[in-house]
């Protein structure tokens, strides 16, 4: 590792780690945003729910909100129904067991309700407003745990820092081996490296 090309390898690795970190962030943002299906109530939407398991309905808000009174007002003010389109069977909705939220690309959401899907397929979600203080609401539905922006950024920075660390190790080892070889040359009167 005494050759000067190792410095080039370290530089390319450092640049590659920047690109890889950025690519990870973009990929995770697209995955997280694509995993949410948004819709407005009052209204109705047909969605394909292609995985078994529990889905959560979130209310999208203009800013992050953890105030339980606001969330409770949305729960009282909205009437939602989820129906399997093929069988027209209504799916029972329950209050979300824990308050979860998401922050993705300027979108903020807090969990309201959840429901279980046993048969993947097409489902219709119909929503109405039953509280005159609420004109409309933007809701989102998702299944996978939603990563916050901080976690996504932390993952991208971690990928970048690991690449930089490996690059620095390569540079340090190369400098050390080159100085060792130069010291031997000076001590022994041999050929320079």
Image (cartoon, grey):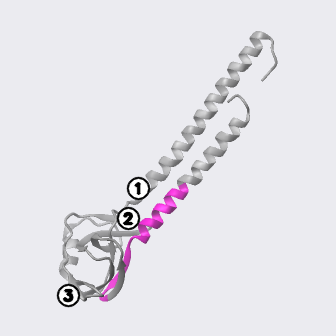
Q: Which mark is residue 68?
A: none
Q: Residues within 10 Å of mark 1 (few under 14, many from 20)?
A: few
- Disc 2 or 3, which lies upstream in sequence? 2
Q: Distance between the residues labelled 2 and 1?
A: 9 Å
Q: Residue 130 carries which label?
A: 3
Residue highlighted by disc 2: 103
Quadrant of the image occupied by residue 95: bottom left
Q: At x 37% / y 78%, what residue is drawn?
A: 38
Q: Does the magenta stretch include residue 35?
A: yes
Which residues are drawn in magenta?
A: 22-43
Q: Quadrant of the C terminus?
A: top right
Residue situated in front as seen by the camera: 72 or 179: 179
Q: Does the magenta stretch include residue 147?
A: no
Q: Distance between the residues labelled 2 and 3?
A: 27 Å
Residue highlighted by disc 1: 150
- Disc 1 or 3, which lies upstream in sequence? 3
Q: At x 63% / y 33%, what residue is drawn?
A: 171
Residue situated in front as seen by the camera: 138 or 122: 122
Quadrant of the image occupied by residue 88: bottom left
Q: Quadrant of the N terminus?
A: top right
Query: In x, y percent, where is residue 90?
Result: 21, 84
Q: Do the numbered discs 2 and 1 sit on residues whose CB atoms are within 8 Å? A: yes
């Amino acid at each position: 590792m005494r050759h000067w090309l190792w410095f080039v390898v370290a530089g390319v690795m450092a640049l590659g780690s920047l690109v890889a970190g950025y690519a990870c962030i973009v990929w995770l943002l697209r995955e997280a945003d694509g995993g949410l299906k948004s819709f407005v109530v009052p209204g109705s939407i047909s969605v394909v729910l292609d995985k078994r398991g529990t889905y959560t309905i979130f209310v999208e808000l203009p800013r992050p909100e953890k105030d339980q009174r606001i969330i409770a007002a949305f729960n009282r003010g909205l009437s939602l129904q989820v129906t399997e389109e093929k069988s027209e069977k209504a799916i029972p909705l329950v209050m979300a067991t824990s308050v979860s939220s998401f922050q993705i690309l300027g979108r903020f959401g807090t969990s309201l309700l959840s429901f279980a899907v046993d048969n993947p397929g097409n489902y219709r979600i119909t929503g109405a407003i039953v509280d005159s203080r609420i004109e409309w609401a933007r809701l989102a539905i998702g299944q996978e745990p939603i990563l916050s922006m901080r976690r996504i950024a932390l993952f991208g920075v971690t990928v970048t820092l690991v690449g930089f660390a490996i690059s620095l190790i390569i540079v340090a080892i190369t400098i050390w081996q080159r100085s060792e070889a130069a010291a031997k040359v000076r001590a022994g009167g041999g050929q320079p490296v």
